Amino acid sequence: MGGSINRMKKFANFIKEKLQLAGFAGDKEVSNLSRTDRYVIYKIGKVLTVSHGIGVPSISIVLNEIIKVLSYAGANEVVFFRVGTSGGLGTEPGTVVITKKAVNGSMEPKYENMILGKRFYYPSDLDSKLASQIQFCSQTDVDFPVIYGDTMCASDFYEGQARLDGAFCEFNEQEKMTYLKDIKKAGVCNIEMESLCFAAMCRKAGISAAVVCVTLVNRLKEDCVTLSPEDHEEYQLRPMKLIIPYIINHLLKTQ
Ligand code: URA
């Protein structure tokens, strides 16, 4: 799963190429199987590639629907990945972060959902064995930096991620930097908008899951993403490149 419709179509074609080479997919053209225009689903061999939109409410709907579909299909030994983009804390843009645990803006590893007027909390730890298997691939299969650390999940792109350049701002540059440095010290490597819900829902469903996001900006230096279109394009493929060896291995083991 990843946020954008276009990115996931690109991933579908990318994974088709790799799975074909490994004998796990035919040459059928990838086509969108989703009946809603809210998200796309591509199926390449045993791999589903799904867009989840932006933020927790959007990903929670898609996760509910995909988890139900896989359950009706009798799918087992399923592994979920969120491959996305994020803002980094002190790392060069293009660095890929494998999430240790997802935390909220107060550094708590729990996802809050309001159900029938009551607050429910779900732990947001991820599968550490899966994370280390992906990290292992990074030692041989890729030529970009990969790190392992916590990911902060914010409920908006601007103030929720300590940005000063939105339409509103309740804090100043100094308060922003104090916050970002504090969360970095607490173990946060990057900030995005879906990991908390993704981790908690997969955990609740008993699904092994990993969050792998590339950083597009160093938030200790700037708020805006200032990458060239070429770098932007190439960086967005990095999380996908990182998980493909794992996917091929998993298919070999479970075929
Ligand atoms: N996505 C986010 O949520 N934040 C960033 O800074 C970049 C991408």
Image (cartoon, rainbow, N blue to C red):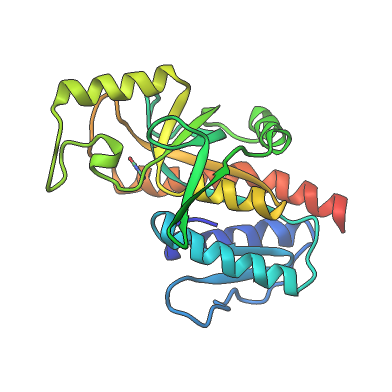
Q: Residue furthest bottom?
A: 35
For the residue pair 94 and 183, the one nearer the viewer reads as 183
Name the residue: 37% across, 42% down. 154
The percent position of residue 203, horizontal first and vertical second, equals 65, 48
Question: Number of labelled discs?
Answer: 0
Placement of the C terminus among the 4 image quadrants: bottom right
Image location (x, y in percent) of residue 105: 38, 35
Q: Is residue 220 above or below residue 167?
A: above
**Toward which corner of the image does residue 127 lie, by quadrant?**
top right
Q: Tell which residue pokes out farthest to the top in this image.
A: 185
Q: Quadrant of the N terminus?
A: bottom right
Where is residue 8 drawn, in percent x and y? 50, 61
Can residue 225 be seen?
no
Q: Quadrant of residue 192?
A: top left
Asked if residue 150 can be seen in this view, the reply is: yes
Q: Residue furthest front?
A: 117
Residue at (58, 58) in percent of width and height: 14
Q: Is 208 on the left or on the right of 125, as rendered?
A: right
The answer to whether residue 144 is above or below residue 32 is: above
Task: Kindly identify the residue that appears in the image at 43 percent across and 64 percent down.
Answer: 6
Question: Where 51 falls versus 105 (above or below)?
Answer: below
* Residue at (23, 40) in percent of width and height: 159
Which x, y percent locates residue 38?
43, 73
Q: Nearer the viewer, residue 113 or 57?
A: 113
In front here: 217 or 197?
197
Observer-nearest residue: 17 or 227? 227
Q: Quadrant of ligand 1?
A: top left
